[in-house]
Structures are given as C-alpha cells and as structure tokens.
Image: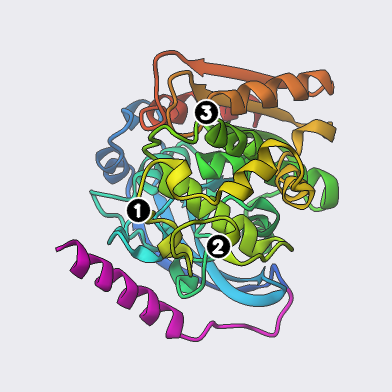
Amino acid sequence: MKRFIFIGIILTTLLVSCKKEKYVDVAPGTLIESKEIKTITKSECISLIDSVDASGFATYDVQLLEVVYASTYQGKTIETSGMLFVPVGIDTFNLVTYCHGTVAPADIMGKKWGTPSQFKGEKFGFIESRNVGLSWATAGYTVFMPDYIGYGRTKKVEHPYVYYPELVNAIYDGTIAVKKYLLDQSAYYENKLFLAGYSQGGGASFFSHWYIDTYHSSEFNVTASLNLSGPYHIKRILQTIIEHKDEKQANIGVYAWALYSINKFSELKRPNDYFFSYPVYDQGSSFLPPSKVPSKILNNFFMQQIQNGKDKEMIKVLERCWVAKNWYSPGKIYLYHGDQDDFVPYFNSEDAYTTLSQNGVDVQFFTYTGKKHWNVLKPFITDAKNQLDALK
C-alpha cells in the first residue's frame, strides 16, 4: 500500500510540474483583477467562526474578494493571488495583512483547504480564513491573506518555505495591490498597516515588518506586527536539530522541506545530496523522509560543517532570515508563543524578544502557558484583536 501511495505522490508532483507557469509583463504589485466571491452576513460569520465566540464583536457583513496581482518569483514576474475580507459599509479602512501557517507542499496530502483564495464560506476546513479573516473583518478590519507563491494560482511551482527573502515578495506585492484597490474605493485609507501571522506566517509577518521598515517605509507605516509562534531564528533551529540528531523528531519532514527550500531559493543551490542521505528531487520528496531520526536522513558531513561553523556560506544564508539582531522598528512588535511548543521551539520568541528589547524596540512578549503549537490560535485571535482595537 505504501508503494502505491508513494507512486501516486510522484505522479501528482509530475503533473503539477508539467503545467506552465503564468508569467506576466507588468510591474510587481500591479493589481490584475479583483473578483467578488460572495458576501457573508454578520450572522453567518458568527456561525462559521468556531474558534471563538464572535457574537460579542461581530458588527459587519463581510465581502470576500479574490485579489489577483503580479509578484516576483525567482527573478521573474508571476501572477498570484490572495483573499481580501472587506467589512461591508465601512467608512475607514484599517488594513491587516495576515500570513497563514504551513500548508503541505503541492497538495500531496490532499489538503486543499488551506489556501485563502479558495475559501468560499465553507463551514469546515480553512481554519485561519474562517477564524482569523472573518473574525477580524466582521469586527471592522480589512484583512488581506496572501496565498503565497506555490499555492492557489501558482500551485504548479514550488513554495519558498520559510525562506523569507523570497517569500516576502508575494506578501509585500499583494499588500501594494490591495492598497491600490482600497484607494479606488470611496472609503478613507491612509498608509497605516498592521501585520500578523501564525507559524510560518508568524515568521513571515515578522520578516515583512522588518522588510517594509527597511525598504518601503514611504509606502506603509507599519503600526504593529502581531506574530504567533513563528520560526524567526532558523539557524538556531537547525543547530538544535543537529545537536539531537540521534533522537526521533516528529516534524522532521517539515524541517527537511525547509532545508530544501532554503537551498533552492537562496544563492546556495547545492546538489541535494550535500544535505540529504535519501533521494530528494523536489519539495514533495524532501517532505517525506524515510526516518524521523535526523542522523538517518541528513548528510553527516553537512551536519559536522554546521556544528563546527565551517559552512560559512550556509550560515550566512540562515542568518539572513534572522533580522532581529540589527533592527530598530518605530512600530510596535507583539510576540505570542506557547511554552510547550514542540514544533516551533519557544526559544524563537525568547530570542526575538531579548534581541529587540536590547535594540530599544517597543516589543511585548505573551506566553501561552502549557500551550503547544496547535492550540495557540484560539486565544491569539481574541488577544490580537484586542491589541488591534487599542492601536487603530
């Protein structure tokens, strides 16, 4: 049975890779199309939101709009998409760009319910679209959720998983496209922006905040980012995996995918067998290692080079994702993390908080005591909304 499953995965990956990418001849950030999907009434929002009780704050009906825009992918301009949640009848736009968490690559696990632009108001699946997008939109916030390249309209190409210097393009370009859409509406919008995200999205939100502060502060004033359980300190995560290389690690497939992605989308572009001791030829195969023990799937020479600090090129790439060390943000930064997280280690938020505090940044760190990675979204939805209410 496993053999047939594996063959099916290979066929799926091959079929996906055979489709041609839709590259476009317009500038990144160009709004190509805004397509109305449906309007969800306030009472329907309350019914669809099942992580929190929305009856106390639901105020607006919510219009769903698929936003199609141009972004950069490996140096080319590609058409991609996301979902915009717009409160109906709002007279001032408070824009939140929300970055969703990890979705298995190339739909190989059959999970097609995680991509925001595919959400049509279903009662099941789409956990973040239903519970974050609808919650905050019915409360009065305009929420943009990018699909990321590798999903939705671009599911035929590989996703730059946790390699933020590439991932940030789809987030920033989509936010620019949404800004253009909002400016065409009659309601008022200024360049104030909130960023938020969970898991991979927490890291993406954190990096996007730095990116906009550093390169695009004239386009947006980032009032705050609200970052939940994000892998900010990827170099330390890899070092920790290697330190425990002979122990089973339940999420090793996701870590292997991250390693594959960082190699592919950075300037490294090394042969995959430099890193892996099992056959890796694409993101799907990296995601399905034959063992959960790192020493049985990672090349021993590579691990030694990381442990002794001799792989300076790799370390340089990993440190590129760790932006906290030299960053002073004029906006506020909120970090949220469960102290029993067994997927994205708690030290990510500890390190980010300590480093940003030393830089003089206005940063706050909220610990969800006893919570793991998979049960922190529910309290975050309410806590982050309360922070937004205080800042808008």
**Res. 234 mark:** none
Tell me the quarter of the picture where residue 246 sits.
top left
In percent of width and height, residue 222 lies at 73, 40
Of all residues, the one furthest to the left in this rendering is 1
> In this rendering, which labeled residue sits more in front, label 2 or label 3?
2
Q: Secondary structure at mark 1?
A: loop
Other-residue count near label 3 (Cα within 10 Å), few / some / many at <14 / 14–19 / ≥20: many
**Residue at point 46% right, 27% down?**
380
Residue named by callout 1: 290
How much space separates mark 2 and mark 3, taking CA atoms?
A: 27 Å
Q: Earlier in the sequence, mark 3 or mark 1?
A: 1
Residue carrying label 3: 345
CA gap, disc 3 and disc 1: 23 Å
How many numbered discs, if any?
3
Residue at mark 2 to residue at mark 1: CA–CA distance: 15 Å
Q: Depth-wise, is mark 3 or mark 1 nearer the camera?
A: 1
Q: Nearer the viewer, residue 338 or 360?
A: 338
Q: Which residue is mark 2?
A: 273
Judged left or right of residue 248, residue 148 is right
Position in image of residue 154 (x %, y %)? 50, 72
Amino acid carrying label 1: it is Pro
Mark 2 or mark 3: whose residue is earlier in sequence: 2
Please report the bounds of the magenta region as a residue range.
1-27
Q: Determine the residue positioned at 35% across, 45% down.
A: 130
Which quadrant: the N terminus?
bottom left
Residue 317 placement, left or right of 135: right
N-term mark: 2 or 1: 2
